[in-house]
Amino acid sequence: MKCMFSMVFLTISLCLNALEKPNIILIMADDLGYGDVAFTGNPKVKTPVLDKMAETQVRFDWFYAAAPVCTPTRVSCLTGRHPSRVNMSWAFKGALPKEEITLAEILRDNGYRTGHFGKWHLGQLSKTVKQTYSPNPVSAKLYSPPWENGFDTSFSVENSVPSFNPYYLTCGEFGSKDYLMVMDKAVKKGQRTGGFVWRDRFWEGPGKIHDEWLEGALPEILINQSLKFINKSVKDKKPFLSLIWFSTPHSPVVAGPKHRALYKDLSMGEQHWYGSITAMDEQIGVLKEELKNLGVSDNTIIWFCSDNGPSWVHELNSAGPFKGKKGSLSEGGIRVPSVLEWPAKFKKPISISEVVTTSDFYPTLLKWAGITINHNLIIDGEDVSKVISGKSKRTKAVGFQAPVMKSNAKDTKAWNKIGGRQMVWLKNGLKLISIDDGSTFELYDLKKDKEEKVNIAADNPEILKTMKSELIAWLQSCKDSADGKEYK
């Protein structure tokens, strides 16, 4: 009888624990700079949903994308590891290795439903059909889609698509003299004249292209797809992980009449730019409202951020007070807006002034889900659950490394013109940076000088020596990982 009672108690406990696991939604904007939302001080843009989250839940004032461009940051989100460890330090470079153990794989193995919606950019989605405008040919070696990396459900595109009418763009073909990064004319829903058909298509699984014409705002399309997944998960009483990776406001930037009208007194380019951001913000609100209707909003984590700083291809965007843009390891290239909501856990507004990064998603979310990491791959991220709760400070230093762009003056192909290496070691508010592969270094006290104006390296030789030594050791560790030593 005692044994039977223990078995019943264990079964009940396991069921209760499963029900208590938080749902997780990771939302990522694309090329949204620190200064491109109202809650960080932008005077023009309308982002009421994100503003309210920042005001009432958790706001991060010192949040970093793991890289200054999109692909590598996404690697960090799914693996907790710096992208250089998997040879994916730049856009379109490599594909997520099968040996990596993703956040989705671990959560799925522990009872979660998993879905990816939007921009993937971590490998090709087909072994035979060329999708994106990347120069890479279709290759089995570059094939690494969501469904082979832990996702049960996908509505995924290999790269960016227009932010309105995503299968069509009303200007010249990509790469031509008439191509526009930001639309300069009004665009109607479903318009299919005066331009060209975009190459990328959304995929729902192996060999399954979404072949229906997509119309309207891209954020609405993606949120609708995600909500189908969420509704089914809730109905089946399964905790879920939903990655909603917008390509808004990455170029080509397009907004529909409804959202442009909110900025009717501004230029046409500004109407499209700000309108596209507001369309994204609005749909995050739609998502939150549906979670409330389903009765799961309290125990659902929503964590929002951008994948890097603002793009160099136009000047409508903003890095806020920071120097540099996308592609640079200056603060403007990697410091991004971020907010987190989890009503069941965070009852009061919290402002986090500690460093947090996209690499921290992995260990932190697994901690909150009650899951122990049981593999030996090096994790660069830190479990910042206690940091967010105000019970501790960050303990891990943060390293960055990326190629250096040779051109970025509104060059549509600047991302592919790279050479050399830039690197950063961030520790206790001090930032060591080199943009010439370690030949020279600068040191900044970001707590006093967030604009990176005063190089204090000459006045702090011992600190400089220590931080350089730590950076070099980390770079070697990343190289060892990139050489496959952890997989052996």
Image (cartoon, rainbow, N blue to C red):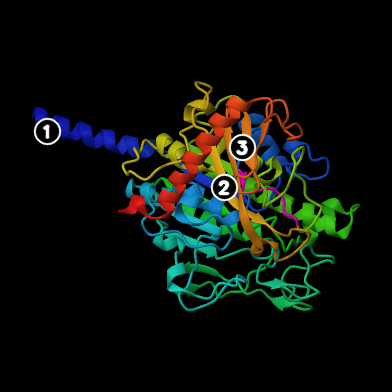
Give the crowd class for mark 1: few <14, some 14-19, many >=20 residues within 10 Å. few
Q: Mark 1–mark 2 contact, CB under 8 Å? A: no
Looking at the image, which residue is at 66% across and 73% down? 198
Q: In this figure, which residue is indicated by the disc labeled 3?
A: 63
- How far from the left and from the top, in percent, is residue 328? 68, 49
Farthest left residue?
Answer: 1
Instruction: Judge by depth and name the residue closer to the eye, 228 or 384.
Output: 384
- How far from the left and from the top, in percent, is residue 83? 50, 51
Left or right relative to 480: residue 438: right
Looking at the image, which residue is at 60% across and 44% down? 438
Asked whether residue 185 appears in the rendered view, the answer is yes
Amino acid at dot 2: Gln
Instruction: Judge by depth and name the residue closer to the eye, 464 or 477.
Output: 464
Q: In this figure, which residue is indicated by the disc labeled 2?
A: 401
Q: In this figure, which residue is indicated by the disc labeled 1?
A: 4
Q: Mark 1–mark 3 contact, CB under 8 Å? A: no
Residue range (magenta) = 305-312
- How far from the left and from the top, in percent, is residue 43? 83, 40
Look at the image and say whether residue 432 sits in the magenta stretch: no
